[in-house]
Image (cartoon, rainbow, N blue to C red):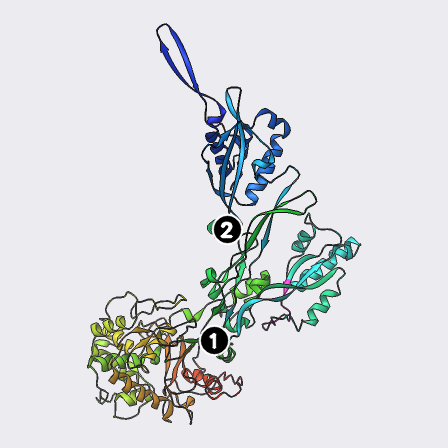
Amino acid sequence: MQKNTGKKKKTGLALGLIAVAAVAGVGGWYVFLRPTPQEVIREYMGYIEEGDYEAMYQMLDSESQESVDEESFIERNQNIYEGIEASNLKIEFPGQATKDGWTKYTTTMDTVAGELTFDNQIHVHSEGIGMKIQWEDNVIFPELRATDKVQVITDESDRGSIYDRNGRTLAAQGVVSSVGLVPGQMSVDAGQQEEDIQKLADLLEISADSIQNALDASWVQDDSFVPVKEIAKDNSVTITLEGENANSELVDQLLEIPGVMVTDAEDRVYPTGEASAHLVGYVQSVTAEDLEKLDGQGYDANSVIGRSGLESLYETELKGEDGNQINILNEDGEVRLTLASDQAQDGEDIETTIDLNLQEMLYEQFKEDKSCSVAMNPLTGEVLALVSTPSYDNNEFVLGMSQDTWDALNEDEDQPLYNRFRQTFAPGSSFKPVTAGIGLSTGLLSADENLGYSGTSWQKDESWGSYYVTTLHDYGEDVTLRNAFVYSDNIYFAKAALQIGGETFTEYLKKIGFGQEVPFPISLTVSQYSNDGEVISDEIQLADSGYGQGQILVNPLHLASIYTSFLNDGDMLEPKLLMEDSSEPSVWISEAFTQEAVQTITEDLVDVVNDSNGTGYGLHMDDIQLAGKTGTAEIKDSVDDTDGTELGWMAVYTTDPDTENPILIVTMVEDVKDRGGSGYVVDNLRPVLESYLTGTAYVNDNVQEENYEND
């Protein structure tokens, strides 16, 4: 309800008489029609929703206006009706409603505490040429007396928590430290007080002006605790929900300042911080713009709202509904009567498919890189990890981030705020199984067919000018699919793509999700096969597309979904993010590839990891069979560019459906040129896979640089 502060001239039934004149002969007579009491009451109550309290006052009789002045009337009515958020006000009259000037009616209205219905009566009578209302406080509520007050008590709901598949907390209400000042305990010397405030501001990385503004608030007394900023209990990523292990070093420095007090407070906490920040996101206080946009949806000035990640995605489920109670208090502040109440409803808890142990291991292993990793259970489609590095501490968005920290995050050339697992990248050789799947499924490629020896450099004919497809390994003249996988032969897959043909290649990519939204709660950039979305008709572009270059860009989770077809008889699984009662998979694309094609491809990808010549041999394990494909994609401005960078890829999965912890991981790392290409990714994935698959303790064995040959 909005306050109407302007004067309104309104022609109402209660403000005057409606005259109907009839003239007969040389004389005349007049009949005056007065509004009914019901019409007067409807008009009066209608002004409540309009917030026109001045018009309401004008409808009071002279005796009532003598007992209450206009300013007091407006203030009382406005405070009550707007305080309870009255709306949808309806008036009904029973039969024979009016007797001796008193008119009975029933009021129904929506309030902050739910629907409120009550019976009442008003004395409506003629005064002068109009109809007026005899007003007392009980016109507002029948039990309300002039000395009473109306109170609204809010019972705040708890925001729902977010958990991983094993019940570990990703986001929850937890304990933080609230740092504040008690004015009466501060230094009495003005100069020293100013110095202390600046020292406090420096320690908390906030402005001294913000502290002074808090101290200058009208409610502050000498013994008041004036909150200044909240800090994590241990001032780091690992925040205990119980509020233990306070950071003694920072707290000790704070408590050295006269007047500073540190106490426990409740706020949203993210125990895993950087490890899952891009996935979980964060909440912040609502803004005026939020409140305007979300009017009527249960938000107020004290609410928080999810700004990114799961916090934003599941805002409706997580936020809960506050409870409210409308009371009438007597002059001593005691509750005389409760008019309406509704119970607080806490937000729903969200249980994800994420395995936080795996999430943290992947983060720790690649946290110094510009990278992303997605992990799935390839038999169910459950997403086990979504990691983007470098990252940021989402707790700082809740506790209050300094301008310096915000500027540093935005100016960092490694872009820690950039969510890489939502983006698309050139997949390089990790895309070769897709080309093979298309060729084998359409019958345009045979696994045993020898596509011809070309050494390490090849072009179709002279029409290609100076452009050649190159590859690293000269493995001899047995140029078949199996060897092309093991040695990651770019030339073989360039020839295969040309043999398939641009139209077939393009249409098949559409079939397996290119140009489509991935059916996943988190919005992902759509994978593409060309910049303009047209058929790949250029021969060089088609040849390059065969080994994951050209204009091919793939989202890592989409690529992981394609790889699930190699374990599910050719069906691509839909990735899942929320735990379900059943772990049965949902098929996204049925028969993405033929069963014969995926069987052949998996056998060859097993050799990529288990043949000592394979580019993925660094992940070979004696007791658990893995299959996979490496990839190195060149990122350069032109064909002749020698200063471009490289992306390193590894897609790896367990092949045995009876594996205790089946897994499929797709990892991409930027800037691996001169750091070992895809071999860098392979060696950094090994400790993660060993720990996850064997149950042994994870040891961070980050490999920064080795001498590898790119695939």
Residues 622 and 505: in front is 622
Quarter of the view holding residue 668:
bottom left
Name the dominant secondary structure of the magenta segment: loop
186 left or right of 544? right
544 left or right of 211?
left
- In the image, is residue 330 above or below residue 405? above
Q: Name the amino acid type tagged 2.
A: Leu
Q: In the visual, does 539 lie left or right of 42?
A: left
Q: Which residue is mark 1?
A: 165
Query: Mark 1 is on which residue type?
Result: Arg
> Nearer the viewer's eye, disc 1 or disc 2?
1
The spot of residue 479 in percent (x, y) is 25, 90
638 in the magenta segment = no
Q: Between 662 and 156, which is closer to the camera in this rendering?
A: 156
The residue at the point 39 percent across, 75 percent down is: 582
Vertical comparison of 391 with 631: above or below: above
- The circle on residue 291 is 2
Q: Earlier in the sequence, mark 1 or mark 2?
A: 1
Q: Residues within 10 Å of mark 1 (few under 14, many from 20)?
A: some
Q: Secondary structure at mark 1?
A: loop
- The magenta stretch is 230-240
Q: Is residue 461 visible?
A: no
Q: Local crowd at mark 2 within 10 Å, few (<14), some, or many (≥20)?
A: some
**Residue 264 % position (x, y):** 67, 65
Image position of 242 with respect to 148: above or below:
below
Tell me the residue at 57%/54% (across/down).
302
Asked if the magenta segment contains residue 237, the reply would be yes
